[in-house]
Image: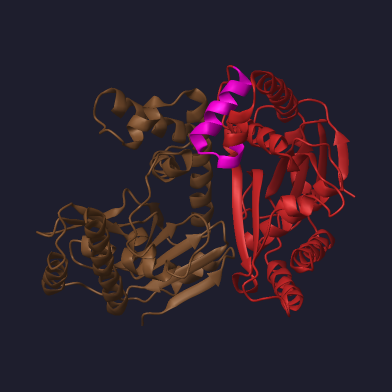
Amino acid sequence: MPTATLLPPDSVLDALRGDRAARPARDTTSAATYRATLEQRIGDVLVGVPADTRVVLTAASLRRSAQTRDLHDSTRGRLRGALVSVLLRLHVVGTPLGSAFDDALTAWCAEGPSSDLLTHWESLDDDERARLATDVTAHHVTLARALGEVPDEWSARTAQRASLRLAGGRVVLRDTVDLVIGSVHADVAGVVLFDVTTSPLGDGAERALRYHALVETLRTSVVPLRSAVFSSATGELWLREVDSDMLARAVDEVVAAVSEECGPR
Amino acid sequence: MNELTVTHVDDEVLARLVDSAPPTSAVLTDDHRRSLTARFRAVPDPAHRRLDAWSVETAGRAPSDFRWTPAAARRTLATAALRRMLPTPGLTLVGSVTQALDAQVARAQTGQARAGSLAVWLDTLGSAARGLVVAEAVGWAGAVLEVARGLEAPWNVAASDAYYDVAGARTTLRGRRDLEVARGDGLVVVRLRAGSPGTTAGAGLRVDLAVLALADSRGVAPSRVIGWWPEAGVVLAVDGSMEGVRAGARDLVRAAVVTRRHRLHLAA
């Protein structure tokens, strides 16, 4: 289980940084094993599957199970998530905000958002827009208070994307981590992954947390130090040290998700 | 050799690729340049054409309507920011990107920027949208720095892309470059790319190789051009051989033919 905490304000960064002296050595050798295992097991799953079948997995694929529908899945939930992600990015680079919602919307529109979310936004009436505005503002307040000021010196990267091909390109693992701190070239394990969800934390969030760690390991061939997920709905932070058990479990979950995607519908 | 090296990223891959780069590379002569000019002049185009690796990777397809976005702006700002930050102790990545953005806005406000340019677009943005541009550029600059930290040889951030105007053919060629790494008397060039490499990524790298050789006043090609796709965790590399330069030049001429055909089709 991850370390689950409801933290006082301004302390999320302290939790992410942890005790510097206690960081493990950098693991630069395990990634090849996880990649080989994934290739082999996904290859087994794809036996008998039509060659033109393509599977694209994201953290959202891992977050939802077959039985449950996450709040993330609704268009409104995705729009709220997109706006809160924008606010996180602005917060990290220290952009002064006037109205959080209006600023998030302006920045989001400049980004060239997906047409389905834009269409959804345009279809909302004044009352729905007002509800969305207050919702996004509340999430932003929770997030900003918990995170505190992110030091410029950390060179934190936001919305870090990944797109990894497996099984000759038939399976693609896509990911976007909201905030990444640290360098793969540090003397000890130093990369911390931080994801924000606007939903309460649940089993799906834990799977997503492991998925982020696995994708980062495969992308850089260096095992990250920690993977964390923060709920801006509840102010809860789940934090996990990345280790071999966690990555092995992530491999199982990815293989299961590919199997589910390729299975009979 | 005209081989394409493909490998997964690890923390020593760049140092290995730099160390193993061939000690010598192709050198273009005036005859090579004249020959290329003749080929481009044989494909006349009423408009001034601009060709680069992307033109070849997309098989000369006409580009869709371009609009500036934070993602489109990040590379220019990140490069400018890194060139400010690296020689300035104490200047942070966020600070240097903000300075680079402010410099662009100042150019627009003093009438030094042309319509449709990055500077003019940035000048139209409010504080929040500029903040998102800063966040994108910081992410890109961070990725460049992460790549560079894996180097043991001296490196620097390229001041600009390489450009070569084909005399009398109304054609400008562009070769992208992000990092330049010293390798003996030569140079290894690294370029970062977003997304995942497609099947034409190797051809794109050879185009960069050809343009970098053409843009060099002595006609010397880089020892190796390395393409780094941080999102995909994949690295591709081509050596600076004459075969590689020729292949890149041939693909550029083909792209010019396709572009012209497309224009004529539109005009008909």
Main SS of residues in magenta:
helix
Where in the figure is residue B28, as x and y percent of width and height?
19, 72
Above-or-below relation of A197 to B35: above
Compared across the picture, whether B265 is left or right of A189 comes to: left
Q: Nearer the viewer, residue A79 or B38?
A: A79
Instruction: Read off the magenta span.
Output: A99-117
Residue B151 seen in the figure = no
Q: Is residue A108 magenta?
A: yes
Which residue reaches farthest front? B268
Name the residue at 18% across, 65% down: B218
The brown-tinted chain is B
Tally the marks.
Answer: 0
Name the residue at 70% across, 74% down: A39
Residue A129 picture quarter: top right
Q: Is residue A243 magenta?
A: no
Above-or-below relation of B133 to B36: above
Name the residue at 11% across, 59% down: B167
The red-tinted chain is A
Which residue reaches farthest bottom? B1
Q: Nearer the viewer, residue A148 or B37?
A: B37
Above-or-below relation of A87 to B147: above
Where in the figure is residue B47, as x and y percent of width and height?
18, 52
